[in-house]
Amino acid sequence: MALSINLSLGEIEWIPRPRSTQLRRLGIETVGDLLTHYPRRYEDRREFAGFPREESEQPICLCGEVVKTRFNHFGRGKRIFEATLQESDAHALSQPLVLRWFNLHYVQKMILTGQRLVVFGKPRRRGQRLCMEHPEFEVIENDEEISIHFRRITPIYPATEGLSQRVLRSLIYRLLQECETDDLAILLPARLQIRAATDAWREIHFPATGEALARAREMLVLAEFFAMQMLLASRRARSRSRAGGMHCGRGELLERFLRALPFDLTNAQARVIEELRADLGSIFPMNRLLQGDVGSGKTVAAMAAMLLAVEAGFQAALMAPTQILAEQHYAVLRRWLEPLGVSVSLRTGARKEDPLPLFAQDNERRRESSSRWSSVTSARDACAAQARSSVPFGEIFVGTHALLYEPEGLENPGLVVIDEQHKFGVAQRGRLTTADPAPDVLVMTATPIPRTLTMSLYGDLDVSTIDEMPADRGRIVTAAREETKLPDVLAFLVGQLEAGRQAYIVYPLIDESEKLEAKAAAAEFEKWRERLAPFTCELLHGRVSAPEKQAIMERFRRGLTSVLISTTVIEVGIDVPNATVMLIENAERFGLAQMHQLRGRIGRGEHKSYCILLRSDPSPETAAKLAVLEKTSNGFDVAEADWELRGPGDLLGTAQSGLPALKLGNLRSDAKLMQRARAAAVEILRDDPELERPENQRFRCLIVEEEGQAFSHVS
């Protein structure tokens, strides 16, 4: 029987049905699934090191003979199974090693005196004895398959109950023996081929040398990356082939807006606006990612793009992930754009009214109280005639996901702007951006993305980066402190409040939890009211009703509330220039990128600001993590450090993006391989977009997506 990559394991006669069921628990159903069930590590069993004399921080692999087993009882029904392992060499003078398992009764049935074991673990000193606690182990049997499991560089696989290492190893070994060369084809262009596909598969599982393993891994990682890049490149080509149109006005409205600003654009903002202008003036649909640090001025760039679109007579939509952020965008856009004759409407789950009462008085107060709005007032008068002209401006809609399901009036979108795009699902974004003809699409994120990840996950997008901060941004000092320093932190906080400033106090939970040792906002709220009296404190979290949430935020904006005790609901979009202190409790429970986002809520005015990271975990790992935020306020540096600490899993989200999952490649350490794969994919689709050439037809299977699925404008 030919063993094609897509053949079901249930159709292979020598794999029993119960074994197929066990394999399915690991997600292994086809020949390809089994071949790509890669080892998680390897043990060099060609020659074992002698037994250790001291404990070690590094796990080691040993082989020995079981000379004694016993049970020790302690407490109620608790037992320790111990097996004493001795080197098989009778002349060895090393100390025996005691293997210990706590309450794992099945181990007793597997390990018997006289057996030979291969064990993997960290030796620890326990009194006078060297022990390995809960080591991985494998019984060495004198069977005909010993050459598969022993005397070689041996693969160790992710396993499950009923599927031992020996079983998995034997299955994969036989599969490789029975597959023909054509069965094991690897989809790679000739320029990326390193060696024969058959050799690569065999060497990734059963390498003869470390060098052979490295070559096999390189080729298979290239294949994974090439599949990802072909899909991204095809999405990009598909997006550019959609019916679009030019959505760019002459720029007079934009010029009036820029002249009215009380500050100068940074060079980065000016560069990005020109990139957006070029996209809007093209017949190809814009599909652009705008990334920039918290407070770098992305909103101004987005407003510039929307003005160009509405001046051309089209509508523009700005979608935000939360009602708080949508209403804040709405207030800002009304303040700046309605004096220019541009209509702005709000669409959220809670509101469909215009204007928004909570902001109306505040906007008027701001206009009356600050001379810097005088230029805006002049602009209102200057464009009164324009507003009455026969060529009306398009309208701007601001909203949450409610824009997707109740797009009343949004009938002619020329530009769609999606803020904090990672908080929306692919299907949600696609619903707003798949109109025909296609609108231009701009997605924004204040979570800087490492370059390799941008190239991987957002390879189908053009990327603009605002990498310069406005000169008038207040400086933020960040300090990590242990929980015992809370009295000192309290004294500092009171001093800031007495100076007229405001503060945020952020917790990881709303309510206390029996499972998690972490403080909760609701439980700590009353304590802070007592500590900070007579200053006013309010509580904000995700379960507060929408109207009350709006009222709480409005009182904080007006300065009627001094301290906001909150969860991460304030992570994005809250803009209160007078708030200069951010206290994050249980800081060890937050990711670096999330704390950087939270820190971005302060430093928005002229005053120096302070972010205090209070930790209850004294470990060196937590100290090192928080030190990153103490050392830098650059979001791109924080993103790189966060990626290094946590890995790409949380950032990548391939399940949501529709991209193939990576089983072998590492986006960080294999960045150069990703660049090679990307260059090859782009060249192939540029020269042969329909993959019609004989040598390219085999790649068509890499770019087939589910019928009806939009090629992702964002991922």
Image (spheres, grey):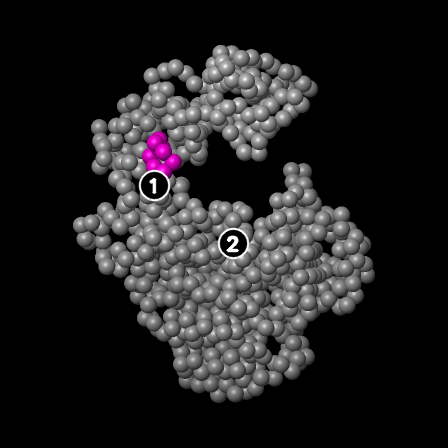
Badge 2 local density, few (<14 within 10 Å), some, or many (20+)?
some
Going from N to C along the chain, the mark reached first, 1 or 2, is 1
Magenta span dominant secondary structure: helix
Question: Which residue is painted at 59% across and 13% down in the image?
Answer: 70
Q: Which amino acid is tagged 2?
A: Glu
Viewed as shown, does residue 694 lie left or right of 77?
Answer: left
Q: Residue at x 67, y 38 (%)?
A: 514
Q: Which mark is residue 3?
A: none
Q: Is residue 89 magenta?
A: no
Residue of label 1: 215
Q: Camera-side residue: 468 or 272?
A: 468
- Which picture quadrant has residue 42? top left
Numbered range of the magenta stretch: 203-212
- Secondary element under disc 1, as helix, strand or loop, is helix
Viewer-proximal residue among 202 and 319: 202
Please state which amino acid type lies under the numbered disc 1.
Answer: Arg
Residue under the image location 48 percent in, 57 percent down? 449
Compute the Cα span from label 1 to label 2. 28 Å
Residue indicated by mark 2: 640
Percent of width and height locating residue 604: 63, 68
Q: Which quarter of the figure has residue 173?
A: top left
